[in-house]
Amino acid sequence: MQKFGTETVVEFSMADKNFLEFEIEALNRLQAIERRGFIKSLSAQRSFTFGKDIVWSPIVGGPDVYCDQHKWENRKGQDYLNGDIVLRRVR
């Protein structure tokens, strides 16, 4: 169950070559924990941006289960995800 009482996950399928064309900030677990603390210190959990197309990092601060997340930060990514070449599936 998610933080806000939802269980919806949207899975996106796309070609690797398309995904790798984006400017990606990849964080390991330690970097993600450090960034989370920094972002919280700014009280910017909902508004902080990294200045990249995508931020790829493990989810931290919740249950101790390893899972990656991808934060799409700009209109370029939004347009891509809503386009015809990306398969979307709600699980």
Image (cartoon, grey):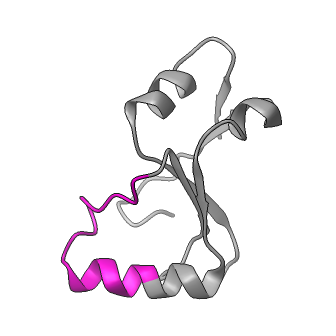
Q: Is residue 43 left or right of residue 28?
A: left
In the image, is residue 54 above or below residue 14? below
- Residue lying at the far top of the rendered structure: 84
Q: Position of residue 33 (x, y in %)?
A: 50, 86
Q: Which residue is most to the right?
A: 16
Residue ID at (23%, 86%): 41
Q: Is residue 11 depicted above or below 66 in this figure? A: above
Q: Which residues are magenta?
A: 35-51
Q: Position of residue 36 (x, y in %)?
A: 41, 80
Asked where in the image residue 29 lies, by quadrant, the reply is: bottom right
Residue 44 drawn in magenta: yes
Q: Would residue 63 be visible to someone looking at this image?
A: no
Q: Residue 84, image x and y in percent?
A: 63, 11
Q: Quadrant of the C terminus?
A: top right
In reply to whether residue 1 is colored magenta, the answer given is no
Position of 11 relative to 5 (above/below): above
Residue under the point 73% across and 30% down: 18
Quarter occupied by residue 80 = top right
Residue at x-position 69% and y-position 16%: 85
Residue 59 at x, y percent in the picture:
57, 72
Along the line of sight, the residue nearer the viewer: 60 or 29: 29
Residue 45 lies, with reference to residue 42, above or below; the image says above
Instruction: Say whether residue 8 is left or right of residue 51.
Output: right
**Residue 56 vs residue 22, the one in the foreground:** 22
